[in-house]
Amino acid sequence: MTTTAAKERMAAAMACSTEAWRPGVPAAGLGCAQEECHLFGALLNEVPHGVLVVDDDGVILFANLAVNVMFLPHQLEMGGVIGTAAALEPLARIMAEAREHRARAESEMRLTLPYVGEWNQEHHYHLSAAPWGEAGRSGVWVMVEDRTEQHLSQQMRRDFLTSAGHELRTPLSLIHGYIETLKSGMIKNTSSLVRCLEVMEKHSRRMMRIIDDMLTISRLETQDEPLKTETFLVRACVQDALEHLMPLIEVRQATVTVDFPPDGGVLHGDRFYWDQIFTNLIEHPLKENLRSGLRVRISGRWTPHECILMVEDNGVGIRAEDLPFVFKRFHQTAKKPGQEGKGTGLGLSIVKRAVEAHGGGVEVESTPGVRTLFTIRLPLPD
């Protein structure tokens, strides 16, 4: 049986009795078709795709839990009909098309739901509808697939390509310009020559950082290489990150404090990734805050079962609307006036993937202008 034929058979089976899948109604005595209907209904309430079955009069014969969640607060109740709300118009239109042409129809729809949190974002649904008919009854079934995540991922990739292209083009253009200047012989004195070389070195390092971040996130997400675990001191790892970031710390006139147990905090993991974790977490507030006087505190404590590492600052913080997305690949907050290029938005994504690769988790809380806290929780072996 083909996939389409199976779906039509399923729709027809569910349409056989609107009572068969209602909670509390026993299947015994309903007959084979009703038992099929009861089974299909129970199974389809567990699938992530929305499933809707209507008859030729537009009466809803079945609507699983997923389709009702997708279209909240619009209720698709058995025995009812598709409402006239504008949000449901694409749904009604594709059903009418499948019914009129007696053929399969597909379309895309966008819907912004009046809900809090991430449900406030625009959702992208793929609608697939086809007619069904059996034993003198007929109608249309619709399957709704939520493709919001795929759409966001594609959008972030497009934004990343634009951002990465810009971030790489700018230093490349500067380096190319200085090379042309050097080749022309216009620079005669040593101090100007040294200045040119310093600028070229600075921007070449910037390009290397972008490329390294891209390769790191690729390795973490594809798990091409196993972790190279070793025992190391977390305080030493933090101090190495601070030494690397010292020029930026001095420019920002920031105060950094480190608070670890007397033994330095022993951890077993891949030191390469932990260097990146602390570098990115400490660098984040330094880059976000243009004013001087920033205070950053890095601390850690160990319990018998877990290691808790924290990076806290009193800077501008993270806006509430950005908090759910700070660990997403390629996500960048709005650039502040006078702020230099902020890279590709991979730093915090690397933090999340690297911590998860070690079996831990990371979370963030922020009160803008008061306090931002990144907390890593890592289980310890018994």
Image (cartoon, grey):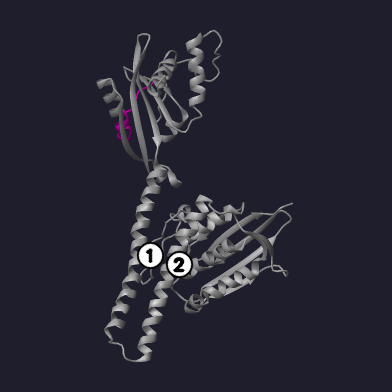
Q: Report the magenta residues as a range.
A: 80-91
Question: Quick one: 320 or 251, which is closer to the camera?
Answer: 251
Q: Is residue 230 magenta?
A: no
Q: In this rendering, does residue 71 appear at all?
A: no
Depth check, front residue: 62 or 217? 217
- Residue to which mark 1 is pinned: 335
The kind of secondary structure element at disc 2 is helix
How far across and down, in percent of the image, does residue 217 sit?
49, 56
Give the residue displayed 44% in from the left and 17% down from the top. 14
Of callouts 2 and 1, which one flags the residue occurring earlier in the amino acid sequence?
2
Q: Is residue 81 magenta?
A: yes
Asked if the residue at tag 1 contacts the one at tag 2, i.e. Cβ–Cβ closer than 8 Å, the answer is no
Residue at mark 2 to residue at mark 1: CA–CA distance: 19 Å
In the displayed structure, 26 sits above or below 342; it is above
- The residue type indicated by label 1 comes to Lys
> Label 2 belongs to which residue?
209
Which-is-in-front pick, marks 2 and 1? 2
